[in-house]
Amino acid sequence: MKYGTIGIENSPRRKATLGSYLVGVYLFSVPTFSYAIDLELNYIPQCLGIMVGLYAVLDVIRSRKVNIPAEIRLYGFFVFWLVITTLLVGNGNNYEALLTSVKVGLIVLCVTQLIKNDRDFKNILFIYGTSILFVAYLNYETLLYLRSAIRITEMDRFDGTLANANTAAIYAITVLWVSFTLIFNKKTGNIIKLLCIAFASIALFMTYFSGSLKGMIGIALFAISAVWTFYKKYERSLGKRVLIGIAGFGFVVATLYLIYKSPFFFRLERIILFTDTGSPGERLYLFTTAIDVWFKNFISIFVGIGHDNFRDYNNLCTYSHSTISEVLVSAGVIGFALYFGAFILLLKKLYIQSKISFSKIQSTQIFSCFFFLLILLFFNATAVLYSSRELWPLIGIIASYSHFLRKERIIIIKEMEAVSSTT
């Protein structure tokens, strides 16, 4: 065996574990059933979540190993801290939201436990990606109307069964990332790649008609990250770098033109020209008020005021619409350090692994995950996502994949040392 090229692409073919199928089906069910109240099917993802949890406990007992990376443990401590701070200083009226956060935290830990190899990682991403077909089917009439409408107003933004335009846009961008991650992997079959192109097309269509500012900016960021990932894949070939640079520039320009031609571009234009005093003004008021409440005394600075309690401290009676301000006001500096520490630690691990990866497949997928996390950090600045039922399980999957790569690298280095010592 030539160790100069050893890595995922030359390692024995692994099989996807049963746990990855359970996790994939659970993630598939979240956007398909969780938000559609009218369908009355939100019990499906809850039942699947229980199955994932039980199987994760069984896996720990059977393997006698806890397969949870440090960054996901930090997130788990963050959720635990939400419970502690709410019990200590909360007003006791918003326990339903706290229960949701606890359930998300537990499912993230369980999901992370069940990812064992790179095959599991790709398997889950593909199953999750197929959910876009069912979401599109459930919202077919709404999407058909938006496509054919002569005049679209701000009230026509797409949300459908996802209940909120921003939720729809963020979900669609996660599917874009899933699709491109699988397409960039040369070991992905041609049929799967064709399906991923279909997933990405539908997701782009949904984002286009969501009217979400986060979605518009997210598409631009995603286009830049996709070009950079592709560029890094062929960075050792000067000719390909030039071609990718030219094609990438055209791709980014085309993406910006697509955003410009969106029927909801006027919303972004009003922000750029500072002529929108509606929603942005309310968001700014909520953010500044949250910071003021957080800064009111020593206890609130370090401990916060309790999970989801900020809605009782502002005139709009709602949350602050930013993870930054919401975490600070709810859980204080301690909660802020735990939550964003998990992000920073995972980003650091991915960056280091991108520098020392043994194969192009590893490097490409690591870069894809790295830029996806950066996009999610942007979303965290403009939305409250620490209890997201899709995003944090996906982050857990990325963390597990990174954890697997680290373990594989250690094994490979030991094998290389063993070979060199015998020659």
Image (spheres, grey):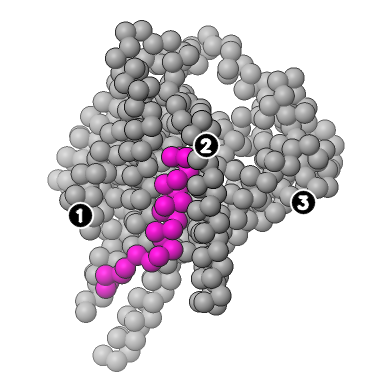
Q: Position of residue 390 (x, y in %)?
A: 49, 44
The quarter of the picture where residue 383 lies is top right
* Mark closer to the chain start, 1 or 2: 2
Q: CA distance from mark 3 to mark 2?
A: 32 Å
Q: Position of residue 156 (x, y in %)?
A: 44, 15
Q: Nearer the viewer, mark 3 or mark 2?
A: 2
| Crowd tier of the residue under label 2, counting other residues whose Cα lies within 10 Å: few below 14, some 14–19, many 20 or above | few
* Mark closer to the chain start, 1 or 3: 3
The secondary structure that most of the magenta stretch takes on is helix
Q: Position of residue 165 (x, y in %)?
A: 48, 26
What amino acid is found at the position of numbered circle 3 in the picture?
Answer: Ile
Name which residue lies at 29% across and 50% down.
182
Tell me if residue 326 can be seen: yes
* Magenta-colored span: 11-33
Mark 1 lies on residue: 189
> What is the secondary structure assignment of the residue under circle 2?
loop
The quarter of the picture where residue 309 lies is top right
What amino acid is found at the position of numbered circle 1 in the picture?
Answer: Gly
> What is the secondary structure assignment of the residue under circle 1?
loop
Residue 84 as seen in the image, left or right of residue 383 = right
What amino acid is found at the position of numbered circle 2 in the picture?
Answer: Glu
